[in-house]
């Protein structure tokens, strides 16, 4: 029987969202009040693995380890097909028995839809019209035939899916557009201030000592002519 991918992205988005709630509520009847006790997530163990499609690493596939109760553990494969599982957003898985689903959902534009689009509150554009490419015995949460047991020490699990009619979509790297390079604004030309000839130094006129006042020589009265005393004749005896 040939598998024809028909599961729509909208349906799988609802299924994935329901899986979280379904796992929290549990899929079996509680045998005792103790069964309703939430698990101790401090006891999770590391779980990693690899997914291949016909022997080739399968990127952007979603791997879910589904327990009988409580939240499923999920992971997304990288370019080399490796994955690491998380439970309620934290790395690790509780030891125990799990059903395993591996989903490879591809949008009409050819891009694989990983965990991000499936966890959004409303179906993103890439999920609308997307199709599940893997057969339900691998991808369907309820019909999967894959099972694994997680030991107390954790583990690494390998899956090699056989589906000849499925091709691997090239991984589309998300490249952020570089901001347009803006040339730095040219600095305004530096204008040298107009050179002004320095004003000639103000030269104070040489201070000249004032000429000494011309002093007229003191006018001296001419000395009176010397008068000889009149010679008197001796009186006759």
Image: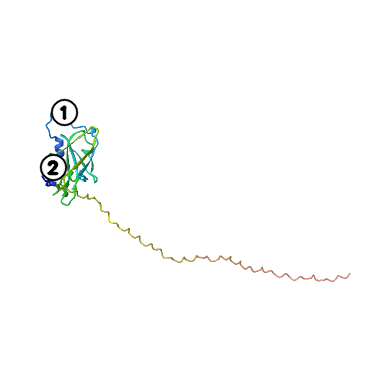
Q: Position of residue 108 (x, y in %)?
A: 15, 51
Q: Residues within 10 Å of mark 2 (few under 14, many from 20)?
A: some
Quadrant of res 227: bottom right
Q: Position of residue 173 (x, y in %)?
A: 24, 50
Quadrant of res 25: top left
Vertical order, 201 against 79 (above or below): below
The foreground one among 209 and 164 is: 164
Looking at the rendered image, the quarter that the N terminus falls into is top left
CB atoms at circles 2 and 1 under 8 Å apart?
A: no
Residue where numbered disc 1 is placed: 34
Quadrant of res 222: bottom right
The foreground one among 18 and 46 is: 46
Vertical order, 221 against 77 (above or below): below
Residue at left 16%, top 28%? Answer: 34
Q: Is residue 16 visible?
A: no
The foreground one among 91 and 101 is: 101
Distance in Å between CA atoms under marks 2 and 1: 34 Å
Residue where numbered disc 2 is placed: 136
Q: Position of residue 193 (x, y in %)?
A: 41, 63
Extreme left residue here? 1
Q: Which mark is residue 158?
A: none
Point out the tag, 2 or 1, that comes first from the N-terminus.
1
Extreme right residue here? 237
The foreground one among 84 and 15 is: 84
Element under disc 1: helix
For residue 136, side relative to residue 155 (left or right): left
Q: Is residue 105 visible?
A: yes
2 vs 1, front mark: 2
Residue at left 14%, top 37%? Answer: 22
Element under disc 2: helix
């Amino acid at each position: 029987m040939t598998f024809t991918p028909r599961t729509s992205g909208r349906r799988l988005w609802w299924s994935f969202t329901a899986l979280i709630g379904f796992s929290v509520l549990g899929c079996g009847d509680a045998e005792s009040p103790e069964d309703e006790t939430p698990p101790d997530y401090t006891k999770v163990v590391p779980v990693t693995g690899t997914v291949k499609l016909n022997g080739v690493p399968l990127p952007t596939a979603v791997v879910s380890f589904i327990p009988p109760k409580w939240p499923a553990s999920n992971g997304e494969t990288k370019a080399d097909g490796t994955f690491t599982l998380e439970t309620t957003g934290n790395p690790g898985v509780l030891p125990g028995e799990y059903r395993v689903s591996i989903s490879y959902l591809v949008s009409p534009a050819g891009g694989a839809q990983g965990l991000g689009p499936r966890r959004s509150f409303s179906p993103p554009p890439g999920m609308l019209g997307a199709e599940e490419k893997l057969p339900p015995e691998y991808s369907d949460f309820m019909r999967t035939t894959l099972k694994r047991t997680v030991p107390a020490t954790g583990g690494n699990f390998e899956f090699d899916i056989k589906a000849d009619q499925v091709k691997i979509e090239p991984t589309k790297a998300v490249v952020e557009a570089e901001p347009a390079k803006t040339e730095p604004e040219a600095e305004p030309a530096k204008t040298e201030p107009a050179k002004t000839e320095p004003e000639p130094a103000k030269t104070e006129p040489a201070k000249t000592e004032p000429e000494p006042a011309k002093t007229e020589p003191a006018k001296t009265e001419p000395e009176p002519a010397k008068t000889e005393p009149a010679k008197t004749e001796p009186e006759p005896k």
